Amino acid sequence: MSQADLSIHGQVSRTGATEIMTAPTFSVAAKKMAMWLFIIADTATFAGCLVAYGFIRNATPDWPRPFHSISNVAVMTLVLLTSSLTMLIAERHAWMGDKAKAFLWTMLTAVCGIMFATLHLREWMGMIGEGATLFHNPWGTPLFSSLFFSITGLHLLHVTGGVVALIAVGLRYRGGRYNADDLEITGLYWHFVDLVWMFVVPLVYLLNLSH
Amino acid sequence: MATAATHKNGGMTKDLIVFALILALAGLQFVIAYQNITASEMLVRMLSVAIIEAALAVLFFMHLAENRGLLWFVGIFTVFVLLALQYGWTDSFRVLDGVKWAK
């Protein structure tokens, strides 16, 4: 039985003997279950924000469509989706015991996250330059800017937190303090951030594209 | 839970196929954005594509396909929350039909 299996099915005592305590829920380690519970809660948070956005957009007759180009958001999407693939590669290397490659791919994922955040901030600066702020919108109702900055800001906050987590967990994994399980759990969070973006793009960007 | 064995068995080929599918679906959303259709039709089409994308990511990137019990647990909770949030939609049409925002 591998160390990874032991960490799932029981606990390893100081003497090295396996002590089966209680069966973990859904055969999932407690820390992984905690991440799933966080993801469920965070899904409710983002869903609440997006439904509120939909409600206000539907109830506002002259909703602005300020986006002329999709090139920036397309590149952002490509970068974030690619980062999910690099994270998967890191997880696979971790499970195969190749620490150096797992660390390298985790750091590449973090670099993709930084690239995404940079592109996002560049877009924000462009919009702020045109006069859009949290409480002012040059194209019509201020509700648009409030919702745009709130929803994309919440997502950007998650990406930033994810980058910090990837770097911290990656370094500790390389140092031997964390194992493949920890890297996979961080990966779960990162894939979730990617998943949320799949809904933010069509609702916040593509539906507000000027034709 | 995905163990070392299941991770080793599922190769990179599967990950690459899923990644390519998600990328293609994301591209499809951008194509839909330029279609000459109403906003509601566009919303339905884009959300349908997004749900398929999300399902692929949850099943294969987040390894839920390997754990049926957890899949049901996460699925039931998430779908319940998402459906419960739809409760207020009708009120947005009431607002649109002439009732002003509260001051």
Image (spheres, grey):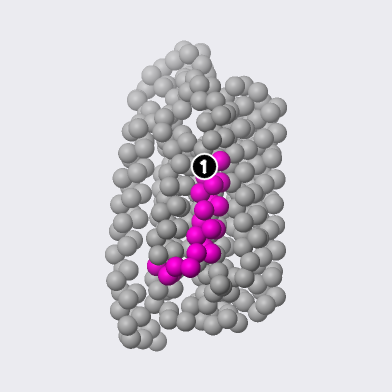
Please tell me whether residue A156 is drawn above or below residue B97 in the rendered image.
Answer: above
The reply to whether residue B12 is visible in this rendering is yes
Does residue B21 show up magenta in the picture? yes
Where is mark 1, residue-wise? B21
Which element is circle 1 on? helix
The reply to whether residue A182 is visible in this rendering is no
Q: Quick one: A122 or A71, which is closer to the camera?
A: A71
The range drawn in magenta is B20-40
Residue drawn 33% across and 33% down?
Answer: B69
Residue drawn 70% across and 33% down?
Answer: A104
Most common secondary structure along the magenta stretch: helix
The answer for which chain carries disc 1 is B
Residue drawn 62% across and 32% down?
Answer: A90
Residue A179, percent from left and from top = 58, 28
Does residue B88 show up magenta in the picture? no
Residue drawn 65% across and 42% down?
Answer: A109
Q: Is residue A204 left or right of residue B75?
A: right
Q: How many marks?
A: 1
Few, some or many C-alpha atoms within 10 Å of disc 1 (few <14, some 14-19, many ≥20)?
some
Please tell me whether residue A117 is drawn above or below residue A111 in the rendered image.
Answer: below
Residue B29, percent from left and from top = 51, 56
Q: Quick one: B43 or A199, which is closer to the camera?
A: B43
Q: Is residue A1 left or right of residue A135?
A: left
Look at the image and tell me in which quarter the N terminus of chain B lies. Answer: top left
